[in-house]
Amino acid sequence: MDKNALFYKLVSFTSSVHRVTQELTKNAKSHSISQTQYNILEYISVSQPVTPSEINDCQNMSMPNTSRELSKLSNKNLIEKINDTEDRRKQYIRLSNDGEAMMNEAFATIESRFLKRIENASIEDLDDIEHALEVLQTKLFYSSDKN
Amino acid sequence: MDKNALFYKLVSFTSSVHRVTQELTKNAKSHSISQTQYNILEYISVSQPVTPSEINDCQNMSMPNTSRELSKLSNKNLIEKINDTEDRRKQYIRLSNDGEAMMNEAFATIESRFLKRIENASIEDLDDIEHALEVLQTKLFYSSDKN
DNA sequence: TTATTTAGTTATCAAATGATAATAAAGAGG
DNA sequence: CCTCTTTATTATCATTTGATAACTAAATAA
C-alpha cells in the first residue's frame, strides 16, 4: 500500500471519526455554554492544567479571543485560574467543581451512547479496538513537539 | 479491560485525532471561504453526492442555515445543485470543477504534512496503521442507520 | 540599565453563526 | 379530494466569533 492511498484512508477515517463524535456528543453539552466554550472545557478536562497559550494553539484561536472565552467561563464559575509561582506572567487553568460536574454529566451522556454503539461487539472485537486505538495514537496521532 | 476504561481511551483518542487533524489542516483552506463552508465542502467531497438534509444531520446545522451556506457556496461557483428526477423536492449537491480544484489544493497541503508526519515510519508501522484504521472504521466508527 | 520578547487583557467592529418564523412545493396516506 | 409530512428557501435578529489595535506586566537579553 502506497502512502498516497494511506492518506486517502486517513481522510475517510477522520471523516468517520468526526461524524461519530458528532453523533455521540450531540446535545450532550449544557445549553448554558456555546460550542466553542464546550470545546475548551473538553480540552481542559483532558489535559488540565493548561495555560491560555496552549488553548490558543490547540483550538486555533487568537490570544484575545481565548482570553475572552476564558473570562466568560470564569464568570460562570466553570474554571479556575491559578497563577504560576515561578513565571508570574503565566497562569494555569483547571476545571472548578462546577466545571467538573458539568463535564461529568456530558461525559455520562456520551458514554451511554458509546456503550450502546459497542453493545454487540465480542470480547475479541473489544480487544481489537483497544489495540487499534493504541497503535494509532502511538504511531499516527502522536503529539509533535512545538516549534 | 472494561468498557468504562475503553471509553476513556476513546475520549483521549478522539482528542488526539482532533488535535492532529487541526494541525494538518491549519491554514490549508482558501481564505475565500469560512471554516463552516470548508467543513461542508470537505463533507461533500468525501460523500458526494449529498442532499442538504444529509449536511444538516452530519454537520449539526439547521436547515435554514445549511441552505444559506449552500447558496453562498453556489454563488462562489464551488458546488452544483442537481434536482432529483424521482422526488422533485430533493436535490443532490456535488462539487463543481472550481470546488474540486479548491479541495484538491487543500488536500495537497494536508497530504504533504501527513507524509512528513509518517516519514520515519517503517513498512511494518505503515501496515499496522493501515490495519488499525480499518479495524476502527469497521468496528467502532461505522455509520449507524438513520432513525 | 535598557531594550526586547513573552503572556495575557481589554476594547472594538465586522462578519459569521444560531435560532426562529413564515412560506412554498412536492410526496404520502387516507 | 384533503390533510399531513418532508424537503428546502427566504427573511430577520440576537449572539458568537474573528481580527486587530492598544495596553500592562513580567521575564529575558543586550
Image (cartoon, coloured by chain):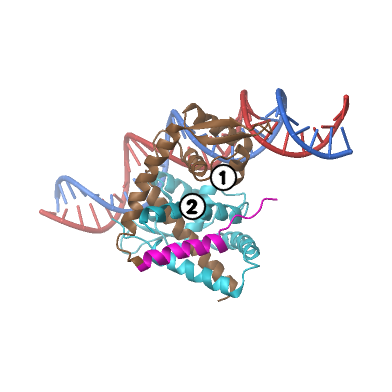
Chain colours: A brown, B cyan, C red, D blue
- Badge 1 marks a residue whose secondary structure is helix
Q: Is residue A144 magenta?
A: yes
Identify the residue shown where x is 56% and y is 71%: B126
Chain of the residue that carries numbered disc 2 in the rendered image:
B
Can residue A86 be seen here? The reply is yes
Q: Residue at x 62, y 61 (%)?
A: B105
Q: Is residue B123 above or below residue B18?
A: below
Residue type highlighted by circle 1: Gln
Q: Position of residue D15 (x, y in %)?
A: 46, 31
Give the tally of numbered discs.
2
Q: Which residue is mark 2?
A: B12
- The quadrant of the rendering that contains the N terminus of chain A is bottom right
Q: Amino acid at mark 2?
A: Ser
Residue, disc 1: A59
* Region of the chain picked out in magenta, as a range: A124-147
Q: Are marks 1 and 2 on the same chain?
A: no
